[in-house]
Amino acid sequence: MNDFKWRHFQGEIILQCVRWYCKYGISYRDLEEMMAERGVEVDHTTIYRWVQHYAPEMEKRLRWYWRNNFDSSWRVDETYVKVKGQWKYLYRAIDKIGKTIDFYLSHTRNMEQARRFLGKAMKKQKSWDLPSTINTDKNAAYGAALESMKKSGKCDVDVEHRQVKYLNNRLEADHGKLKRLIKPVRGFKSMKTAYATIKGFEVMRMFRKGQMRHWQLFPGVKGEVYLVEKQFGIDSQNAYSEFWKTLMAEFEAA
C-alpha cells in the first residue's frame, strides 16, 4: 500500500518536512519559506497535516529500533506542556546514559497515571532491558505506583525505587532540550495534536542521541534519512546501491 497516495507530493518531500519540523525547532511558516527556497511550493497548513499524520506513524514504525539495549538504571520524571491554554503532564523516562526509554502525555499527575506510564515503558521489554533501579523525584505517586505494580505482577519485586534528586539532573537537562523544540509551537490546540507532534520530536531527539546508529546504513544524517524512508518503502534499494557505487568510485580514485 502506498503511504503517500493522494498527497500530491513525493514521499521524500513529505518525510523531509516532517523530519525538519520535528528536529530543528522551527515554525510551520518558517518551514514553508525554507521549502519555497528549494522550489517546493507547499502551504504551512499542509505541512501541519503531514506532521500530524506521519510523525506518529514514524514513531510507531521505528519503535523496534530504539526500544532496546537500555541500562538497568532508569530516571523517571514529568514535565509540563501547555495544551489549549492549560498545563498538561508529559511523563518521560531515560536510562543512566541518557537513552530515551518512553514517554506519555497525560491530563493529570497522580498514582494511576504514573502506574500507566511505568507499565507502558516496561511493556514488551526484553528481560535484560527491564530496570533494576528506578529513580524519581519526591512525588509519592511513583512509590505507590511501583508498589501496586509489584503486587499485581506487572513489575519485578526486586526493583529498587530511589528518590535521589541529583540523579535526575540528566533527565532535567533532557527535558530542556525537548522544550526547545516545543517552544515554537506556542501551545498545542488539543491533546491529540500535542501527542502526535511530541512523538515526532522524541524520535528526532533519539536520532540525535545515536539510539538508532547501529541500524543506519550510512553515516550521519544520510543514515537517518535512509532509515526513516525505509520504513515507508521509499527507494531503499536504490539508495543502498548508490552508496556502494560512491564508495567504489572513491576507492578507485584513491
Image (spheres, rainbow, N blue to C red):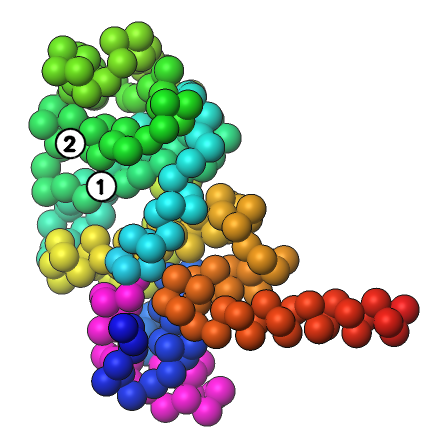
Q: Residue furthest right?
A: 254
Q: Position of residue 11 (x, y in %)?
A: 37, 77
Distance between mark 1 and mark 2 Cα atoms: 9 Å
The residue nearer to you, when weighing 113 against 157, is: 157
Name the element at disc 1: strand
> Looking at the image, which residue is at 13% across and 62% down?
189
Magenta stretch: give its range: 31-55
Relative height, residue 171 to residue 63 (above, below): above
- Name the disc covering residue 232, or none: none
Quadrant into which the C terminus falls: bottom right
Q: Are marks 1 and 2 in contact (CB under 8 Å)?
A: yes
Q: Position of residue 93 (x, y in %)?
A: 33, 33
The secondary structure that dominates the magenta segment is helix
Q: Residue furthest top?
A: 158
Q: Which residue is mark 1?
A: 104
Name the element at disc 2: helix
**Residue type marked 2:** Arg
Q: Is residue 202 visible?
A: yes
Q: Which residue is mark 2?
A: 116
Task: Please state if 57 lies on the left or on the right of 170 as rendered.
Answer: left
Q: Position of residue 94 (x, y in %)?
A: 39, 33
Task: Please state if 208 lies on the left or on the right of 19 as rendered.
Answer: right
> Looking at the image, which residue is at 42% across and 76% down?
12
- Residue 33 within the magenta-colored segment of the rendering: yes
> Looking at the image, which residue is at 37% across and 16% down?
133
Q: Position of residue 179 (x, y in %)?
A: 34, 50
Q: Is residue 78 visible?
A: no
